[in-house]
Image (cartoon, rainbow, N blue to C red):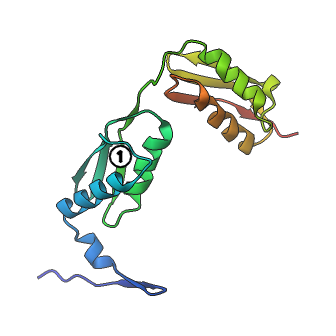
Amino acid sequence: METATRTTTHTADVTVDLCALRHLTESVICRGVEAALTRSPSVPEGIAAQVVDRNVTLTGQVDWTYQREAAEQIVRSLPGVGSVENQITTVARTPLENAQERLNNARFRDPQIQPDHVVVTITGQTAVLTGYVRSLAEKRQAGLAAWIAPGVTAIENRLDIRPL
C-alpha cells in the first residue's frame, strides 16, 4: 500500500495542499492552461497546449516575441505544471524592406545605447548585434531596441560588455 505524505504551506490567509497539486490530472491541468491563455490579453488565439505527465508543450504562431514569452510565463505559474516546452514560433509581420535602416535609426534614438559601438545586421529574419556596450543593462536594451525592425523574428545579441 502506497502512502502519500500530505504537506501544506500557509501564506497569509491561503492554504495550499501540495499533495493535491501533485495529483492534478492531465485534463484538469490542460483546462487550466487553456483558460489562462484565453484570459490573457497578451496571448493571441491559436496557441495550443498539450499536457503529458504534468509537462506542457505550447505550439502555435504569434506576431510578437512578447506574446510567446507571455504564454510561457502564464503557463509556468499554473498549479500542477511540472515544466513548459515553448514551441511557439514568431512569424514575420511585414516585409524586411528598410528594416536595417529602421533598426539603425532606433538604435540612435535610445539614450542608453552608444550607437557608434553597436553594429546591427539583418540576416534573413534575424537581427544580429555585434560590437560592445558598457553594461549588461545596455546589452539588454540594445536587444530590446532590435525588435522594432519589421519582419525580425529573432535576435542574436553578440554584444560584448566592456565596462569603462
- Residue 157 shows in the view: no
Q: Quadrant of the N terminus?
A: bottom left
Q: Is residue 50 left or right of residue 160?
A: left
- Give the residue drawn at x 56%, y 12%: 97
Q: Position of residue 6 (x, y in %)?
A: 29, 84
SS for dot 1: strand
Q: Is residue 47 above or below residue 114?
A: below
- Give the residue drawn at x 41%, y 56%: 74
Q: Is residue 157 above or below residue 135?
A: above
Q: Position of residue 112 (x, y in %)?
A: 78, 38
- Give the residue drawn at x 44%, y 33%: 63
- Categorize mark 1 by other alpha carbons within 10 Å: few (<14), some (14-19), many (20+): some
- Give the residue drawn at x 30%, y 46%: 57
Q: Position of residue 108 (x, y in %)?
A: 77, 26
- State the residue in front, 90 or 86: 90
- Residue 106 shows in the view: yes
How many callouts does the rendering have?
1
Q: Is residue 27 above or below residue 18?
A: above
Q: Position of residue 141 (x, y in %)?
A: 69, 39
Residue placed farthest to the top in the image? 97
- State the residue in front, 136 or 48: 48
Image quarter for residue 62?
Answer: top left
Q: Quadrant of the C terminus?
A: top right
Residue placed farthest to the left in the image? 1
Say which residue label 1 marks: 85
Image quarter for residue 80?
Answer: bottom left
Q: Is residue 77 above or below residue 7?
A: above
Residue placed farthest to the right in the image? 164
Q: Is residue 16 left or right of residue 150?
A: left
Q: What amino acid is found at the position of numbered circle 1 in the picture?
A: Glu
